[in-house]
């Protein structure tokens, strides 16, 4: 046996020992995930197949196909989530870009203003929007006294109010990863692009934006997935007219004797979310491969 | 508020040091001005007199009880509930049967108690209107509530089926005494839901709680709403421009129940016996215009004739109203609510 072989075996042994040690260190966290995440979700999955009489049954899923309202609720949920994500990108991306152009100290100050609402209670922010946006709220009464419009505009207890509230609450989730991605971009790339004759617009779209896509994707995905299960804000600002899956889960728990009726909804929502994440991750990888090919 | 209540109760206990301190009950109710009234009229005085320490919580209704009972982690000893949901929960086996040899109901209205739930107060589901929009002569019937030409303006309505279908049928011309006959079939339920569908473009908000419909009227967010009478009286006391009528209103009662497996079941039973006495019930109308379920409360002299005239259960007011049918809710609520929720998503 040669010295190199011995050495390789020793290295392998060390590697295995290190892996075991790392696994040991990670095991409390793994155990926690197992206990608080995998087991309850598994249980929900199981009870979704239990009918009202306590036996195995598909009735909870059949009901979702038979009753047209479930389809409408899923459509509304995805509509609200997509619109919120889109609006967050439209507002958050330029803001993050603006902040990334500022000197770090001033940018940090801006970051605090982004984070400050993030640290305020979700309920407080939601009710604050209700106070601002309602018929005799601040926005309407100021606008009327300034002569901007004559009749109060309906801005809450509908889709508009729901979107305003949700975009406000979701914005930091988009801005933070996008800003992080932008900060890590070497600005010399843009100079190089200009040096090669690209206009500032062209340099921005062909060099800067593609480099921020991983951050943008991560942020957008986070916003979208959080929106899918959002409850408080749409329940308060939607005025009972914007009904999302999360609210239907609550009303099914209140209405039916068994948990299955509600957990079936959760299982379907989870399934769709996992599908979207899977599709997005494929897209993301392709994007990176395409980016690397340039 | 919870803290200050606990402190009040604690102070009451300290004043009566001779009493046992180890007995505790946890009571969950609906919050807002309703629970405040219960607390001042019933819980705090009864705690002071019996030496039972009271912990108050707010909760989301029988679904919370269902969760606690099914997971075997019951923390609530007494819950305040609507009569209908208590009847359903009792039928599902979520509640302890009440011991009426401990709780004296001999002077109760016979219909205001059940095997699992003892009546605490009588309330009405009424239509209320903004007096700034319509003056004192607002809608006088459910047909008026539906009449958007005579009474133009935005409405609010409940986001659940309980108390939602009866008004629709009366607006559709069904006589109050026939409402539950018509509702006793899928077609009748559809008919009521269609009537709400007709009004839906004028319904701005589907409210989910009493605090919410009171706030909607206070803020002038809608011009007319359905809701529980006591909440409107309290909103009016706070300066809201709101009035309501008992004509064609739905007469209902709230009750107290003990969840199955409550940790302090016997103490809870004793506490329910205490707060069902007329000397506590006669104080409730001072804080909210809900009437007593114990007839003897009218004889103590605490409830003046003027106050009695404002209560849902006063003979003159009760005669104008439709009493809720618990049998209908046990039989139809799940089916009707699925249809109702479906209409809401359209």
Image (spheres, coloured by chain):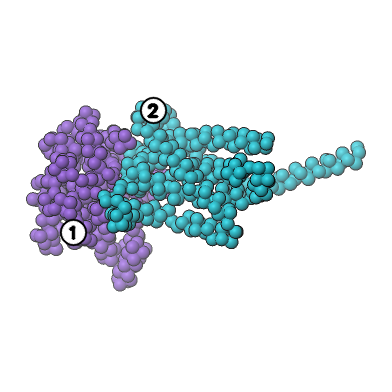
Residue marked by disc 1: B285
Q: Nearer the viewer, residue B64 or A239?
A: A239
Q: Quarter holding the N terminus of chain A?
A: top right
Residue marked by disc 2: A65
Q: In this image, A100 relative to B34: left or right?
A: right
Q: Nearer the viewer, residue A12 or B141?
A: B141
* Chain assignment, label 1: B
| Residue B149's disc number | none
Chain the render paints cyan: A
Q: Quarter holding the C terminus of chain A?
A: top right
| Residue A221 x, y percent position in the rendering | 52, 41
* Chain assignment, label 2: A
Q: Nearer the viewer, residue B318 or B205?
A: B205
Q: Residues within 10 Å of mark 1 (few under 14, many from 20)?
A: many
**Residue drawn where x is 17% and y is 54% of the image:** B132
Task: Identify the secondary structure beneath mark 2.
Answer: helix
Residue A184 lies, with reference to residue B184, above or below; the image says below
| Residue B127 x, y percent position in the rendering | 18, 47
**Residue drawn where x is 52% and y is 43% of the image:** A220
Q: Are marks 2 and 1 on the same chain?
A: no
Chain B is which colour? Answer: purple
Q: Residues within 10 Å of mark 2 (few under 14, many from 20)?
A: few
């Amino acid at each position: 046996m040669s010295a190199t072989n011995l050495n390789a075996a020793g290295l392998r042994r060390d590697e295995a020992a290190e892996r075991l040690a790392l696994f040991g260190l990670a095991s409390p966290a793994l155990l926690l995930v197992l206990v608080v995440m995998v087991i309850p979700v598994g249980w929900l999955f199981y009870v979704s197949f239990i009918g009202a009489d306590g036996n195995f049954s598909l009735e909870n899923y059949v009901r979702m196909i038979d009753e047209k309202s479930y389809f409408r609720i899923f459509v509304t949920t995805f509509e609200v989530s997509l619109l919120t994500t889109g609006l967050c990108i439209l507002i958050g991306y330029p803001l993050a870009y603006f902040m990334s152009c500022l000197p770090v100290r001033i940018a940090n100050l801006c970051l605090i203003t982004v984070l400050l609402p993030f640290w305020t209670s979700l309920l407080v922010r939601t009710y604050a929007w209700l106070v601002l946006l309602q018929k005799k709220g601040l926005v309407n009464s100021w606008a009327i006294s300034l002569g901007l419009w004559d009749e109060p505009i309906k801005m809450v207890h509908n889709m508009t109010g729901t979107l305003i509230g949700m975009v406000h609450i979701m914005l930091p989730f988009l801005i933070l990863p996008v800003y992080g991605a932008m900060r890590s971009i070497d600005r010399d790339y843009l100079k190089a692009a200009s040096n090669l004759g690209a206009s500032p617009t062209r340099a921005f779209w062909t060099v800067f934006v593609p480099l921020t896509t991983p951050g943008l994707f991560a942020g957008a995905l986070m916003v979208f997935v959080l929106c899918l299960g959002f409850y408080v804000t749409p329940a308060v600002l939607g005025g009972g007219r914007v009904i999302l899956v999360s609210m239907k889960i609550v009303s099914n728990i209140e209405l039916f004797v068994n948990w299955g009726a509600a957990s079936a909804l959760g299982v379907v929502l989870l399934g769709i979310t996992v599908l979207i994440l899977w599709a997005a991750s494929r897209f993301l990888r392709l994007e990176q491969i395409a980016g690397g090919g340039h | 508020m919870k803290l200050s209540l606990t402190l009040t109760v604690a102070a009451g206990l300290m004043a009566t040091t001779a009493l046992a301190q180890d007995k505790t009950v946890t009571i969950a109710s609906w919050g807002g001005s309703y629970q405040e009234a219960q607390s001042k009229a019933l819980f705090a005085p009864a705690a002071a007199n019996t030496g039972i320490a009271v912990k108050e919580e707010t909760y989301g209704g029988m679904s919370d009880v269902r969760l606690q009972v099914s997971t075997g982690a019951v923390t609530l000893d007494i819950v305040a509930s609507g009569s209908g949901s208590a009847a359903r929960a009792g039928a599902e086996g979520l509640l302890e049967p009440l011991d009426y040899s401990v709780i004296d109901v001999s002077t109760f209205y016979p219909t205001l108690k059940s095997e699992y739930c003892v009546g605490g107060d009588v309330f009405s589901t009424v239509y209320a209107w903004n007096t700034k929009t319509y003056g004192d002569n607002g809608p006088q019937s459910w047909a008026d509530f539906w009449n958007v030409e005579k009474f133009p303006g935005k409405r609010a309505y409940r986001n659940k089926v309980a108390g939602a279908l009866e008004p629709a049928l009366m607006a559709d011309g069904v006589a109050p005494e026939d409402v539950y006959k018509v509702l006793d079939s899928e077609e009748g339920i559809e008919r009521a839901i269609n009537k709400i569908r007709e009004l839906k473009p004028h319904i701005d908000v589907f409210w989910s709680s009493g605090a919410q419909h009171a706030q909607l009227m206070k803020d002038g967010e809608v011009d007319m709403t359905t809701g529980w009478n006591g909440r409107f009286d309290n909103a009016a006391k706070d300066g809201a421009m709101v009035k309501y009528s008992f004509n064609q209103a739905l007469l209902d009662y709230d009750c107290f129940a003990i969840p199955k497996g409550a940790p302090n079941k016997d103490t809870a039973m004793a506490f329910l016996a205490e707060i069902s006495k007329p000397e506590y019930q006669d104080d409730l109308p001072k804080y909210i215009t809900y009437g007593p379920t114990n007839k003897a409360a009218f004889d103590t002299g605490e409830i003046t004739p003027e106050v009695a005239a404002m209560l849902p259960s006063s003979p003159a007011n009760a005669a104008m109203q439709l009493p809720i049918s618990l049998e209908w809710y046990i039989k139809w609520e799940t089916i009707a609510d699925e249809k109702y929720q479906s209409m809401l998503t359209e």
